[in-house]
Image: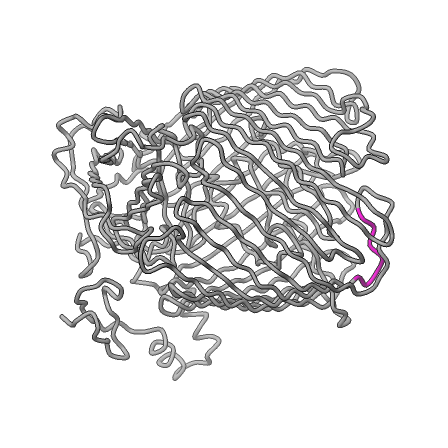
Amino acid sequence: MRGADEQCGPDETPTEPRRQRGHRCVKFPTMNRTMRNMNRTMPRGWAVILAAVIAPCPAFAQSVDGGAPTGVRSGAAARVDAGPIIDGRLDEAAWAAAEPLTGFVQYEPVAGAPSSETTEVRILTDGDALYIGAWMFDSEPDQIIVGERRRDTNLSDSDAFLVVFDTYLDRQTGFVFGTNPGAIEYDGQVRGDAGANLSWDGSWTVASSQDARGWYAEMRIPFSTLRYGAGADQVWGLNLTRYIRRKNEQVVWSPVPRQFGFYRLTEAGQLTAVQPPPRRVTTVTPYVLGAASRIPRVEPGVTYPLEAGADAKIGITQGLALDLTVNTDFAQVEVDDQQVDLTRFNLFFPEKRPFFLENADLFSVGLDFLPGRTNGRTSLFHSRRIGVAAGDQVPIQWGSRLSGRAAGMDVGLLHMRTDGLTGLQDPTGWTVARLARELPSRSRVGAIYTSRVSSDDSGDYSRTYGADARLGIGERWTFNALAGLTDEPGVSGGSELVSVVGEYLTPSWYVRAYHDRVGESFDPQSGFIPDNGFHESSMRVERIERPEARSWWREFRTHVRRTWAYDQAGFKELEFRHLHSNLSFEDGSQLSPALQWVEEGLSSPFAIRGTPIVVPAGSYTGWNSYGNFRTNPSAALSFNGRWDLGKFLSGNRWGGSLGVSIRRGDILTGSLSVAHNRIRLPEGDYNTSLTRLSLRYAFSPDIFLQSLIQYSDQTGVWSGNIRFGWLDTAGTGLFVVYNERLEMDVTGVTGLLPRDALAPSERTLAIKFTRQFDLSELTDF
């Protein structure tokens, strides 16, 4: 055993590189040495391809010996004949069968320091499910912050507990489950270092309780909710975390360096003796819907549609599932947030529809752009293109998705059929195929194919081909690469995309550089792209500082960045040079000011949406300032805002937003925000305002009433959405939804309110009931 300050040899790997104790150096075939050996017998390109895709990866085989590498924290799931009742009390004798997982250490504020409060976790299994019991003892139980009773709410704003499972022990993918003292369900799929896809909703149960010693959480997670490999006695990756909100403290079971997030699975411990059953999942989720709808621009008068449909999940293997949907409906889905459009680039709207959210990260292949170009990322596949045309819903006839893991590969195959919508879209077939393989050292390779084909005889189609790779070197360096090509009738040349990104991360420094090149004809019609016909480069250097002792501030980040983009002819479209800082305070408040020099070039005149103003072609340079702030988000009353001041195209902008949030315990929450921009240009002046009001009342963690009211004077649209939900499991249950949309005459409007209202353009009341039936026990191997 070598001391913590001794270094391993060039071909050795420390099993515990960051703990402050001795580590054992083990010889593994390193990537460099492996590639050198392969290059002796074949060209380098073929060596890389074979090593990445064809060759087996023993490092990712499911461990069956129950052992853990030296220095890695380990716990065991205790086998019981019958699981405990999920009531949040943790007073049943079954819990005594499990050894407690203890020794939590701080992630925030002092990494590695002992937790200020005691936490114990026990894990049981009865062969059908995992049971997690968490004892969160607290010296000031009256100061526990319950938080909001809403599924997948931000748990860092309250006291909370989370568990993450790496079910394949590949250190790359997993599942997270969490809750707060209000017993809400928080779940998601974890992939790489990208965090969690919280849009995924699993089927599981949680309860909580609170007394004079602290608060407690009890979970039951069926194995049918998870995906895992073969083997009777398995070892999974495991990590646990607890938020103690009044202290702005986060503690973890297996230590995670602060520059990485909790979902960094390479830092997780291990859970032994899991013993999952060799079962294939089968669930059926039918729905019935009745509505009264008035949409004059689609059909005159009031209609009373009555619909029914179903989703089904069929386990092909333990890790691979087939999802089917017929007459797909999304009436219960939250409406989109309206956006202000001040640029010439496309707006990005996230996916919220349940069917498309499971394994969404598997199909997500794209790249990031600079902040001035888009508010989202470019994706070779963006499921919002399916079933939506010009903001209107297009009926989905049926669809299927095969996704999961087979033979060490992440596999995704999606096909959907949509109806036509007069004047907007013909009946269309959509196909996506995705393959990816996780490799050692946080590395990955993958490929994607998408197709959109009209069902008529027009011959209209669009295809996209893509390949992506990620290379991790040690814990600090990460490189990503992406290549794409689109194909459509009558287009030849200029339809390619190439991107390379490099990142370096330590506790004190973050450096990122990238270069993107997008052809003028690159158009992934099954994906999203804000612009095409440009090449763009960026360099960012960031310094991270923390006080040596406890202070009124928690962290200070400051970075400099330069980004520039040119079109295919060499004309400069954008350049940013900015200095940006972020100051985090001890109570969770933040202040983020920035100063920026900007040059924006217009190769052709730009007509600003919603106004008669046209900005002529040319280059416009100048200084501006922007930034954000927020107060303590867990307080009963909190504020947030943004400012944008200075140069804007040929003139100036004075703009910003202000929001206020209220919270009455864990029952009532609400927020009001107003964003306003005052634009002054030589070509004309105009103002924009966007107002948003949301309220939510939680009768229980499963029963809620919420509303969202929005108005944008740029588009002249009022929209209102009121939803009542009585949830069952996995996002199913009873929903009553009312939507109203009014289009206003905004000619000459410069304030917050419209002058002349037209008749309602859309009004719908829908009642939907959906229920999931688990038939898994009928399909055991």
Q: Is residue 471 left or right of residue 299?
A: left
Q: Is residue 59 left or right of residue 24?
A: right
For this orientation, the residue located farthest to the bottom is 40
> Residue at the location (31% across, 34% down)?
221
Please say if 580 is above or below 709: below
Q: Quadrant of the C terminus?
A: top left
Viewer-closest of 136 and 677: 677
For this orientation, the residue located farthest to the front is 552
Q: Is residue 604 magenta?
A: yes
Residue 393 in view (yes/no): yes
Please say if 337 is above or below 467: above
Give the percent coordinates (x, y) of residue 125: 21, 36
Please say if 107 is above or below 562: above
Give the percent coordinates (x, y) of residue 302: 74, 15
Viewer-closest of 318 and 572: 572
Give the percent coordinates (x, y) of residue 335: 61, 32
Residue 329 in view (yes/no): no
> Residue at the location (71% across, 16% down)?
303
Quarter of the image where one finds residue 742: top right
Give the percent coordinates (x, y) of residue 334: 57, 31
Q: How many marks?
A: 0
Q: Is residue 548 left or right of residue 683?
A: left
Viewer-closest of 14 and 634: 634
Q: Is residue 344 left or right of residue 657?
A: right
Tell me which segment is drawn in magenta.
Answer: 602-608
> Residue at the location (83% across, 50% down)?
607
Q: Quadrant of the N terminus?
A: bottom left
Scheme of colours in the image: one colour
